[in-house]
Image: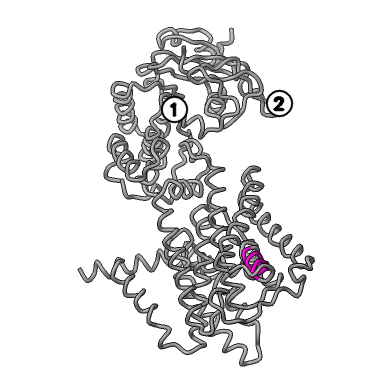
């Protein structure tokens, strides 16, 4: 995988110089959602603890950074870490409640949805955070304030985030935490019998996952220049986050990236075509159909199939 | 001091007395068999010893220390490992990855745990299967994987819950040989639930017989085999 990987990286590094502003935006979203998907993947894909409330971590990270920047002028580059820490704290609370009381499957999913909804409602009713209208960031073009006149900077930051998340997950794969996480996903009782502290393992995973997602919140806010509780904490964002790793292959390093490269262009194409026909929103139906198809025919996502196909080809060519 | 002391433990499930005040001890280096008819409470007793269940009354001491409140992973860290009657392999992981989880209980180092796991896999005769997914293994191989994972945690006391069940005569013979090596070379202490009498009689130093959650008899294999109450429990009492 080394040469194809390096070639792909090289292409992605020079690509912005050949892209128009529209395609640049598409790529920024591909990277950013791959990043969020990878953060989710750590908990949901490797650990098997499905969260449908990951938007809460994006929202907490985004609001923390933006509030600190608007009120105290703190640079989002620093606020990013504080936002990540705030999200990690929320993750620890959810993890403690969920895992201490042994919530599994649907019940854990419901807990994550409920917490995200609570966050959304609390922020929507907090005047200091702009209430339901949200926060609007004033454009200054100051890089220290995470603002750039040229979208290519956002491209490189999003690419950097995606690569950093891949590096993090690749590193975790080769640690005790990584080995324990997949063991917990496969069988909790057997894991306990083999000395795995299942509670602490799951807690570590949700804290790390929430931190990464919260850091992403800073990018989210400063790329969009505005924050609304309904979008930053909403279920649609949570769904966007989990779709990519599931389509690409949950619990694999390449899954979220592959899923993002499949889904984002598809969403764009369907948006363009169906919106033109006055059928706005139809792309969501296409999305839904695709998800059903994946669950039915590729229950472990696209990546395992892609890898097998590549291995076959390699074997074929000697 | 015995390695394991079970003192008058009781466990109820609703109206069912699964374990009704049973005591037993296992000395270091011993192989003790736990036998009894189906539903006698053997597996429940294993759950109580290994921390998966908490006794309603009575207590368990492992190398002198009360185990009350210790979760299974904590007991494993202290050197008490177990296998499950219905084996629980990590289906989506390879044999190596399965065993490495056990090895990581003794070393946080990934490379070291991998090396240790390979040794245990070789010992369990699963070398050829090292990189196969656990879901692709036969039942006999899964039983050996279950044993290998537990061994990788380097236990002082190993609880084996019917590692012979469902095996062919040849497969069971291989398992007996593995257990024999375990005893000779690792000086491991074993508490085994087993239905295959030939295995129990030849392997165990001492046998504890459970029936209806109570200890019916205890002694050497020869003593237990001739015990009137044991014969009655297994075969039923002859009506006059």
Q: Chain of mark 2?
A: B
Q: Horizontal and vertical percent for residue A295? A: 53, 65
From what the image shows, is residue A201 above or below residue A36? above
SS of the residue at dot 2?
Answer: loop
Q: Which residue of the protein is positioned furthest toward the bottom in this rendering?
A: A277
Mark 1 or mark 2, whichever is nearer to me: 1
The residue range painted magenta reads A61-69
- Report the residue at 41% width, 22% height from top: B190
Nearer-the-camera pick, A48 or A154: A154
Which of the two discs, 1 and 2, labels the residue nearer the N terminus? 2
Q: Horizontal and vertical percent for residue A170? A: 41, 58
From what the image shows, is residue A112 above or below residue B26? below
Residue A221's disc is none
B75 is within the stretch colored magenta? no
Q: Horizontal and vertical percent for residue B114? A: 33, 43
Between the residue at mark 1 and the residue at mark 2, the CA separation in whole angstroms equals: 34 Å
Residue B47 appears in the figure: yes
Residue B79's disc is 1
SS of the residue at dot 1?
Answer: loop
Location of the C terminus of chain A (image quadrant): bottom left
Quarter of the figure with residue A106:
bottom right
- Please name the predominant secondary structure of the magenta segment in the image: helix
- Report the residue at 46% width, 13% height from top: B2
Give the left or right position of residue B52, taking residue B143 as reference.
right
Q: Horizontal and vertical percent for residue A118? A: 74, 60
- Report the residue at 47% width, 41% height from top: B88
From what the image shows, is residue A202 above or below residue B34? below
Q: Which residue is mark 2?
A: B15
Residue A296 appears in the figure: no
């Amino acid at each position: 995988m080394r040469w194809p990987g390096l070639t792909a990286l090289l292409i992605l590094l020079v690509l912005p110089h050949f892209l128009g502003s529209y395609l640049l935006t598409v790529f920024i979203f591909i990277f950013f959602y791959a990043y969020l998907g990878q953060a989710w993947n750590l908990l949901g894909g490797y650990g098997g603890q499905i969260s449908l409330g990951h938007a809460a971590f994006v929202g907490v990270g985004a609001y923390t950074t933006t509030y600190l920047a608007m009120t105290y002028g703190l640079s989002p580059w620093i606020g990013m870490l504080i936002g990540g820490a705030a999200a990690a704290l929320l993750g620890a609370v959810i993890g403690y409640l969920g895992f201490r009381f042994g919530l599994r499957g649907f019940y854990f999913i419901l807990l994550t949805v409920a917490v995200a909804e609570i966050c959304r409602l609390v922020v929507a009713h907090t005047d200091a955070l702009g209430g339901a209208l949200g926060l609007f960031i004033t454009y200054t073009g100051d890089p220290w304030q995470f603002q750039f006149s040229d979208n290519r900077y956002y491209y490189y930051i999003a690419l950097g985030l995606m690569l950093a998340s891949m590096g993090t997950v690749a590193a975790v794969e080769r640690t005790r935490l990584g080995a324990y996480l997949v063991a917990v996903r496969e069988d909790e009782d057997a894991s306990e019998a083999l000395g795995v502290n299942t509670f602490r393992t799951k807690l570590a995973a949700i804290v790390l996952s929430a931190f990464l997602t919260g850091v992403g919140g800073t990018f989210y806010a400063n790329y969009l220049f505005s924050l609304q509780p309904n979008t930053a904490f909403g279920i649609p964002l949570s769904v966007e986050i989990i779709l990519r790793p599931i389509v690409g292959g949950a619990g694999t390093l390449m899954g979220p990236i592959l899923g993002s490269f499949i889904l984002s262009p598809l969403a764009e194409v369907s948006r363009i075509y169906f919106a033109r026909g006055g059928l706005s929103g139809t792309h969501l139906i296409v999305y839904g159909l695709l998800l059903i198809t994946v669950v039915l025919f590729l229950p472990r996502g696209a990546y395992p199939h892609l890898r097998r196909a590549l291995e076959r080809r390699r074997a074929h060519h000697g | 001091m015995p390695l394991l002391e079970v003192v008058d433990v009781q466990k109820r499930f609703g109206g069912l007395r699964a374990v009704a005040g049973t005591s037993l001890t296992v000395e270091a280096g011993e192989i003790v068999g736990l036998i009894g008819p189906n539903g006698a409470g053997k597996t429940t007793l294993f759950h109580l010893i290994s921390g998966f269940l908490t006794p309603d009354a009575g207590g368990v001491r492992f190398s002198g220390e009360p185990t009350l409140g210790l979760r299974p992973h904590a007991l494993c860290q202290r050197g008490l490992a177990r296998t499950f009657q219905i084996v629980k392999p990590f289906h989506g992981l390879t044999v190596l990855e399965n065993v490495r989880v056990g090895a990581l209980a003794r070393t946080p180092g990934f490379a070291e745990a991998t090396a240790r796991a390979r040794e245990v896999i070789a010992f369990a005769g699963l070398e050829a299967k090292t990189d196969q997914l656990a879901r692709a293994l036969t039942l006999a191989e899964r039983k050996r994987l279950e044993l290998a994972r537990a061994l990788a945690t380097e236990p002082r006391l190993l609880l084996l819950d019917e590692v012979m069940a469902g095996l062919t005569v040849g497969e069971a013979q291989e398992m007996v040989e593995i257990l024999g090596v375990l005893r000779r070379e690792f000086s491991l202490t074993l508490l085994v639930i087993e239905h295959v009498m030939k295995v129990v009689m030849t392997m165990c130093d001492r046998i504890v017989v459970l029936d209806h959650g109570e200890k019916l008899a205890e002694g050497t294999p020869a003593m237990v085999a001739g015990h009137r109450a044991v014969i009655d429990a297994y075969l039923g009492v002859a009506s006059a």
